[in-house]
Amino acid sequence: MNNLEELQSQFQNYILKPDKATMIPWVGLGGRASPQFQLSVYANAYLSRLKEVLMNDYPALSVAINGDLFARLAEGFIHQHPSHFFSLRDYGSGFPVYIHGLAQSDPCYRDLAWLPELASFEWTLGQAFDAAESGLVTEGDMASIAAESWPLLRFAFCPCVYRIDLEWNTPAMWKALTVDPPLEVEAIRSGSNSAWLIWRQELVTRFRSLEQDEQLFLDALRNGETFSDACEILAERIGADSAPMRAAGLLKGWIQQGLITRIMFSD
């Protein structure tokens, strides 16, 4: 390792773990401040910037718990997970998993069992908003497909489409916590998972709950099933007579909401 590489490595180690630094003779003594103080400026800036990133990525979470607790949560994550990303947009991706681990082990978080789900919901909203643009299927495209082609059709969904399961009243909590001023809201556990759809329509991130038949049909098509196979899954839930009309209505609604990006014809 040459002198520059060694200096960069020592500087990085100090920024990431200033509490474990001992002697730092590689910092000049000619300044008006001590070497420790000079370096602390950079270490504190690093910590503050990443805390700001987490607060921006998780605005409802930062409001839901008091400032000291959020700061402790963020600092713990930063110390355990130094940034290895080229873009700060990706830095907070592991925050929900980190919070889930604390909720299982740290007494301070055991009464906040809803916290990991709120973090996961917020991160998914951000992912949907940042997803790549893509062309959209129109109702005219659907109308032009010959009837005999329908059974083997497959559908590709926009990168902004996410499907998650929630056990708490997380969407209602998020809405209440992100208005100005924030509203008081009670965390309520439903006792069972409910399916939710998250996507971006134009420049607006949207979310809504899914009835079970829509969830089954959507999951099947997103997993690559043909239209015929997905309809069979739908028929098992609502009956063979109702399935065709329901499938057509769901597809029309998804097209209007901007969820489908491509139709694929199977051989």
Image: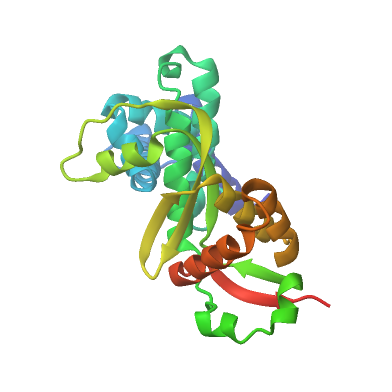
In the depicted structure, whether residue 121 falls above or below residue 245: above
Question: Which one is nearer the viewer's eye here, 35 or 62?
Answer: 62
Q: What x and y, as percent, mark residue 35? A: 37, 36
Question: Which one is nearer the viewer's eye here, 24 or 215?
Answer: 215
**Residue at x 43%, y 63% (from the top left corner):** 200
Visible residue check, residue 145: yes
In the depicted structure, whether residue 118 falls above or below residue 122: above
Q: Quadrant of residue 221?
A: bottom right
Question: Which one is nearer the viewer's eye here, 167 or 16?
Answer: 167
In this rendering, would 106 be left or right of 236?
A: left
Q: Quadrant of residue 75?
A: top left
In this rendering, would 90 be left or right of 57?
A: right
Q: How many labels were placed on the picture? A: 0
**Residue at x 55%, y 34% (from the top left corner):** 97
Q: What x and y, as percent, mark residue 64? A: 30, 31
In the displayed image of the protein, which residue is found farthest to the left? 181
In the depicted structure, whether residue 133 falls above or below residue 225: below
Q: What x and y, as percent, mark residue 162? A: 53, 54
Q: Quadrant of residue 187?
A: top left
- Quadrant including the C terminus: bottom right
In this rendering, would 231 be left or right of 56?
A: right
**Residue at x 50%, y 71% (from the top left corner):** 255
**Residue at x 31%, y 28% (from the top left corner):** 65
Visible residue check, residue 24: no
Q: What x and y, as percent, mark residue 93? A: 52, 45
